[in-house]
Image (tube, helix red, strand yellow):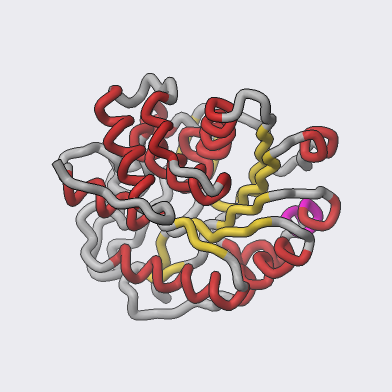
Amino acid sequence: MEVFWRCSFVLALPLSLLGCGRSPADNSRSPGKSPTLAEVKTDARPRNVQSDLDKVRAADFSILFVGNSHTTFHDLPGLVCRMIEFRHPEKKAYSHVVSVAFLDNVAHDSRCKDELESRPWKFVVLQAQKISMSGKHSYSQKVGIDIAKLAKAKGAIVCFYSEWARKGVAGERERTEKIYQEMADAADVKVALVSKAWELALSERPDLPLHAGDGNHQSALGAFLTACVLYAKITGESPAALAAFPYPDAAEDDRKFLAEIAASLSPGGRFVPK
């Protein structure tokens, strides 16, 4: 049986983090080293609890995230909310995460459905589709499509979030985007092309450390770019102004560069290499 990628990050002990590995049996690839605790900075909010109904109702931007470690590392949901409030100080943003290994797990886990049916979420971001490491196998997209349809039927603006390619793995970006685009088309929702933004950024600056040490997860710098793309998809605004967002893990020049990359994917946006 092939081992698929984009697995969840498991908390075995409160301070002991185990990275998500890949079997070297698939295409003889090594799983690589796990990211360190400093590289990860996981969101410390408790998992497997319901969102705060009052906060969901009160928020101008209430965002439900469903995903695995590619969603939770460096508190990506919280970062997106802080960016929204930075640009709109008069608005309130609130996020909640339903952590899953893969979207398929939602079929046997009531948390996501309960959130969608009991909370008036304005936005839903879906990540963690099961994807073949080698690209030789296909996995069912039905559960992810059904989640998106349910969220849309409940009145939310929905987007799938297409993850970046692993470091040095050619063709993975195209493969990943194709799968998420198929799911988005089937559910008539959007796709946030985080994967494309990463590829564009790295094509201009190959040494930019967007990946964590394992070559799979995002670094704090990578999280900034990911959040910029999601900000644009959620708000419908250009993220170019996020160059001024206070983010100690990225130098001013890097923030400006990454915000411009994300803005180039917005309607009418165009990145002009220096």
Looking at this view, is 248 or 219 the one in front? 248
Q: Examine the structure image and report whether residue 250 is included in the region drawn in magenta.
A: no
The residue lying at 51 percent from left, 42 percent from top is 231
The image shows residue 153, relative to residue 20, as above or below, that is below
By secondary structure, the bulk of the magenta-drawn segment is best described as: helix
Is 45 left or right of 182, judged from the image as shown? right
Q: Position of residue 63 (x, y in %)?
A: 66, 44
On-image quarter of the N terminus: bottom left
Residue 163 makes an appearance in the image? no
The residue lying at 18 percent from left, 51 percent from top is 203
What's drawn in magenta, residue-wise? Answer: 111-115
Is 117 left or right of 18, judged from the image as shown? right
The image shows residue 93, relative to residue 266, as above or below, that is above
The image shows residue 14, relative to residue 34, as above or below, that is above
Q: Position of residue 156 (x, y in %)?
A: 71, 56
Q: Position of residue 181 (x, y in %)?
A: 47, 71
Is 171 left or right of 80, judged from the image as shown? left
Looking at this view, is 88 or 128 the one in front? 88
Looking at this view, is 165 or 265 the one in front? 265
